[in-house]
Amino acid sequence: MSSAEIESVLHENRVFEPSSDFVKQANISGMPAYQVLCDEAERDYEGFWARHARDNLLWQKPFSRVLDESDAPFFKWFDDGELNASYNCLDRHLNAQPNKIAIIFEADDGTVTKVSYKQLFHKVCQFANGLKSLGIKPGDRVVIYMPMSIEAVAAMQACARIGATHSVVFGGFSAKSLQDRISDAGAVAVLTADGQMRGGKEIPLKPTVDEAIAMGGCGSVKNMVVYKRTGSDISMQEGRDVWLSDLVQNQPDVCEPTWVKAEHPLFILYTSGSTGKPKGVQHSTAGYLLHAILTMKWTFDYKGSDVFWCTADVGWVTGHTYIAYGPLAVGASQVVFEGVPTFPDANRFWKMIEDHSVTVFYTAPTAIRSLIKLGAELPKQHDLSSLRLLGTVGEPINPEAWIWYYQEVGGGRCPIVDTWWQTETGGHLLTPLPGATPLKPGSCTFPLPGIMADIVDETGESVPKGHGGILVLKKPWPSMIRTIWGDPERFKKSYYPDDFRGKQYYLAGDGASRDEDGYIWIMGRIDDVLNVSGHRLGTMEIESALVAHDLVAEAAIVGKPHDVKGEAVIAFVVLKGARPSGEEAKKIAKTLRDWVGQDIGAIAKPEEIRFGDNLPKTRSGKIMRRLLRAIAKGEEITQDVSTLENPQILEQLKETI
Ligand code: PRX
């Protein structure tokens, strides 16, 4: 982050206090109440988390130990306790509110289907019994590659019910990405659908799973369960593939939960890092679920009368914590949406909020920015008075988009919770509390109670107010990543490097700064990870995809600010043959973009490709990424380039196609 960037955010002095009406009814009401919780955690860290774990989770066997640090940084929480996540999400509501609507599902074409808690419970139980009948056992890994649907949520819950560890792969990922994940996880089954509907178009899913398996390395997969969504013609392999409807048909609609240890891996979710292949972030059962529940209550100020809507896909962590687990565990009614915000037009979100009387709405800054572009005046055409709270996640929100969201969507009355967290953190860590925190547009404000966040320099010393540094977590917390599936060394290296002079801090990988009032401002990644439309992409992953193409000798990927996506992927490419120009360059650029789309998924396709005879390198052969970033942004290069091996290359790379 440049000092100019830090300067500009640190001088944001618009402050939005929560209204007295909101404060009055809030679960955490006013800053003193927040401070009381923070003080309690400070005084007795384990006691604080133990109290919440007892109050919020239903335990089959109570825990007697809270935090076990003996094998740090492989921390364990509540580890001699036993519970079941699905029991905590469904069975607990069967007496008190069996007929309450759990999910209001709206399909791409607008068809609405609702299920009550009791109906969802039976659906999950039948699904779970079906999985058992296939021989799936506790600890087995099950890959889920499904469209947004009640069935996808039920699939995750069914795995949790029988103690199988799910690994959801976003439906937009390619066959190759899917194959990598199936093989890394050693999945015994894949739960999928014939296809999915997005924006009026059908996207195949089962054929992609077949393609992934045909690539090899997926020998662990014994079964495939297929949910019929689109009805399109697909091939089923005798003895391996079964329709979901056939699997559950004669299954009992009750399934005893399998009690698992608190640390039992509830799921693995793959995410990009700065090096190598995507890493399988492994989460626990108890600690993870505890934080999902607490943040529903704290950050989203959950009330029984709420209609909650998180617009994320279940393929991302946001869809895990704030669709599949958090809302169900607190007994909320929630909207689950199959489609996209711009189909049939850019009114879709606002119309759905009106139709379903949504009270809490949680989305990504990139969606907000694209909807401003497509129709800043559209929210006015809808009755959005049901809304009481708004949220954002995934990337920094620029103050202009924040103000628009606040005024035009929230009518100036709804607090906005700008929630900072990661796949690895399991749930929100830095966020305003809507009935307490005075908001500053673009700041995720303060850590939640019990979260020991700080901004430090390379030696691990806290930086003074008004300065930037590295965001760290000084103490382990219950919902943190436990390890990288199959690669504990990489876990240590990535999150607990030997930096900070021996202090054992969790390295988030983000730069941040704190203003004079103590507000935290996230400044973006400090590693080679890009954030494109709120999705994490490793530059190395895209580079590897490009150099795997026959035409390509070398490639470097950098990010460039983008007014809707936040960041765009820019590729600098050296071909094995001569540097192309004109029509030929355009043709090759298209070929390479499609190639990346096929290798990783459409989200990773470079926005621009620039060709050079070489890349700017130091005399020791290191690619000067800083220069590439400047070129991508169209900035003048002011720094001394005399140490470059080949300064003349810079001119070539300025040319876009
Ligand atoms: O850089 C931060 C950014 O997204 C990264 C985590 O990405 P992922 O694991 O895909 O999870 C996204 C959804 C939780 C972080 O390291 N990020 C996330 N939330 C924010 C954010 N940056 C700024 N403000 C946020 N609210």
Image: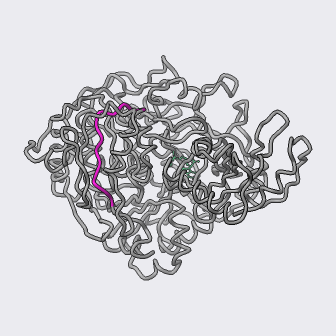
Side (left or right) of 284 relative to 189: right
The single residue placed furthest to the bottom in the displayed view is 381
Q: Which residues are magenta?
A: 184-196
Residue pictured at 39% horizontal, 60% vertical: 25
Image quarter in which the C terminus is found: bottom right
The answer to which of 379 and 445 lies nearer the viewer is 379
Is 480 situated above or below 67? below
| Residue 554 pos. (x, y %) | 69, 43
**Numbered-mark total:** 0
The answer to which of 587 and 61 lies nearer the viewer is 587
| Residue 180 pos. (x, y %) | 44, 38
Is 13 situated above or below 283? below
| Residue 47 pos. (x, y %) | 43, 29
The answer to whether residue 477 is magenta is no
- Say which quarter of the image contains residue 553: top right
Residue 112 appears in the rendering: yes
Residue pictured at 58% horizontal, 61% vertical: 565
Residue pictured at 65% horizontal, 65% vertical: 14
The answer to which of 115 and 152 lies nearer the viewer is 152
